[in-house]
Amino acid sequence: MNWLRPYTYFSIIILVLPVALLVYEGFGPMYNSGGVSMGVLRSIELSFAGSATAGLVNVVLFTPLAYYVSRRRNELIAALSDIPASIPHPIVGISLLLLDSPITPIGRVLLSAGINFFDTYLGFVSALTIISAPIYVTALRSYFDSMERSAENFAVSLGAPPHRLFSDVVVPNSYGGIVNALLTSISRALSEFGSVAIVAYYVLQQPFYGVESASVKIYELYGYSGPSVAVTASALMIVFSLLLLLASRLIKRYFFKPIYTLGGPS
Amino acid sequence: MVDGFVCLMGKNGSGKTTLINTLAGFYDVDGGSIVVDGVDVARLEAYRRGIVVVNHNSHLPNMEVEDHLVYGLKLKGLSVDRAGVELVKSSLGINYHGKVGKLSLGMKIRVALATALLSRPKAILADEVFSSLHDSVAVLESYKKLSREWGVDVLYTTQSVDEGRVADKLYLIEAGTTRLVHSND
């Protein structure tokens, strides 16, 4: 096992070095005040707001799906729920626009109901939801897979029908897993570029009128303002993302301790 | 087979837990029947069978003790009989509060046994839970009295001869078959 520790450190260095270098350069030798402008801060704000909204939508829409896939071992449903993660994300963006376009029947119905994805906060959140949902489902399914089922069996034998089992037993005993999956999906949504660049390059609604997501903004800065501005903006985004990561670790550690215990003296 | 207060004894791996989980509806069956009060429940979903299973992990960890005790009753839409709850609590030595998940194993088992009885099921299947209690024979005697008063049939499994003696009927299970070895009838 002597080789394992240095190998682990080497692996971590591979993962962390580019990011650490970028933060160092962004706030050090390559610092450019254009990278911490109000426009960049607004983009980061939009990214966090949209990602948090998408994460909450994931909780509401996809928690039952993750539970169903876990308990029924339905690999077909699992594979179908993973499709958005396995195709290039610009395609997700194009498919969303097609879904909401006047050339399709569904699009005509959606548009007549005032539902418009193009350059709107709704479209932005929809794209983030679809690309982060597979991450949410996979993370939560793993949690459900590892959950002791005796509590569920006990509730069922007491007479709990499926909907009461879910609301009374499964969800209250899964807050830690749900929050963990939520934060993982938010992290994934924060980094999204491909689908967002197609669906909502700019969000043209208040309070984010004319704001791009952070990933789009950094891409734009790199092309139009030069690398130093993009590097500083990227470093700023990384700091905010690390704060989210730190907050999520603290939340998991202090607020969602497992309430299952190993028993003890009778 | 489960008529009154019945004990099923058998070695590890003899099929006690498999039998209990099959009766409760946790395992699918290919054939045969499971008759409860004259009705074949083998094709019924587990939550409709009226058979409560209690094992070492049978508790709802998120619930407070008081809510846990009456959960089965509330699922059935029955009103809570406070006197009945207090009688069961005192009979099984439940004099504590708090989240069930944070209790010791023995405390959880007592709460689970009480919850099962208070839910007014047709039968309770208790899988080697009494052996984890320091006063197992006394608790068995209390449980037998309560279940008789409330008209609930109980099947419990054990490997202890002392615990087996409390039953009205004692069955042995070996190689998947059961054999009546003692009856008070």
Image (cartoon, coloured by chain):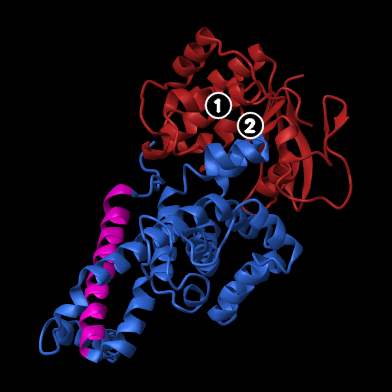
Give the magenta range: A228-255
The residue tagged with tag 1: helix, strand or loop? Answer: helix
- Quick check: is A175 in the magenta stretch? no
Residue at coordinates 60% horizontally, 51% vertically from top-left?
A64
Dot 2 amino acid type: Leu
Left or right of A28, for residue B37: right
Is residue A229 one of those drawn in magenta?
yes
Quarter that holds the N terminus of chain B = top right
Q: Name the spot of residue B62 as percent of width and height, x first.
A: 44, 38
Q: Residue at x 56, y 39 (%)?
A: A167
Classified by dominant secondary structure, the portion drawn in magenta counts as helix
Residue B133 visible within the image? no
Front position in the image: A53 or A207? A207
Chain A, hue in figure: blue
* Residue B71 badge: 1
Residue lying at the far left in this picture: please name it.
Answer: A28
Q: CA distance from mark 1 to mark 2?
A: 8 Å
Provide residue B4's location: percent of width, then percent of height: 72, 22
On the question of residue A112 being in view, the answer is yes
Same chain check for tags 1 and 2 = no
Residue A34, compared with residue A190, is above or below; it is below
The residue depicted at 44 percent of the width and 22 percent of the height is B66
Looking at the picture, how far across and down is residue B157, in whole percent? 63, 38
Chain identifier, colour red: B
Q: Which numbered marker is on residue A158?
A: 2
